[in-house]
Image (cartoon, grey):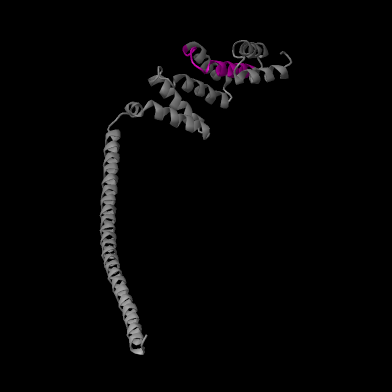
Amino acid sequence: MSCKRLIWMLNLVVFYVFYTGCAGNKVLEQRLSVIEGKYDFLQKEYLDMSIKIEETNNFVYVIQDKLFQQSKLIEELKAKNMSSVQQNLKPQQKEQLESPENLYKSSYDALLSGSVDVAKKGFVTFLSSYSHHSLADNAQYWLGECFYHQQDYHAAITEFGNILTNYSDGDKVCDAKLKIGYSYLQMGDIDNGMKYLKDILLNCKDLPVAKKAEDKLRIYGKN
């Protein structure tokens, strides 16, 4: 092979490699340009979406603030209206305006806090107005507890006895018997006290009060 032919072939190879490389670079540049264009588009979309979300959040905050202000205004108007109505009511009507559940709860809370006289008044009002309510036997029991707490054992026996008379089907009967027994013992009437405690062992033996009655009987040595 002549030198001229060899040089020609080398030039051809160099041209091919150069051309192929340039073509490949152009393809890569084109693809990169497309990707960059898509990236710019997505970035713009993201920014636009972020702005819209922020605007929406601001709008929601404004609406929430308005709703809060309106709700507050409504509550204030209700309070003023209720106050105006209550001012024109008689004391007995004011008591009846309160729901039985609220009256019971407020009386019970008063007893727990040590305001026994307030609790007594509330339970008496409850029983005079809602004697057939599902909470009536509970109210009767706690009224008895008020007197027991004040060591007025005669009155306590009377109020606990009302449970045996008026709410004999309720779930406070055994508790009432226990406190009647305790009240008699506090007054020194051992025989009546023992009678009620022994009745609990017979008729309430599966309830926690039976253990209390048994312990008290053991103390008095008449188990």
**Span shown in magenta:** 166-184
Image quadrant in which you'd find residue 99 = top left
Question: Extreme bottom residue here?
Answer: 3
Q: Position of residue 32 (x, y in %)?
A: 30, 70
Q: Position of residue 165 (x, y in %)?
A: 49, 11
Image quadrant in which you'd find residue 80 = top left
Q: Is residue 99 left or right of residue 190?
A: left
Q: Is residue 220 left or right of residue 10?
A: right
**Residue drawn at 29 percent across, 46 percent down:** 72
Question: Extreme front residue here?
Answer: 1
Q: Position of residue 178 (x, y in %)?
A: 60, 18
Image quadrant in which you'd find residue 39 = bottom left
The reply to whether the magenta stretch includes residue 208 is no
**Residue drawn at 26 percent across, 46 percent down:** 70
**Majority secondary structure of magenta residues:** helix
**Position of 201 relative to 43 (above/below):** above
**Position of 108 relative to 156 (above/below):** below
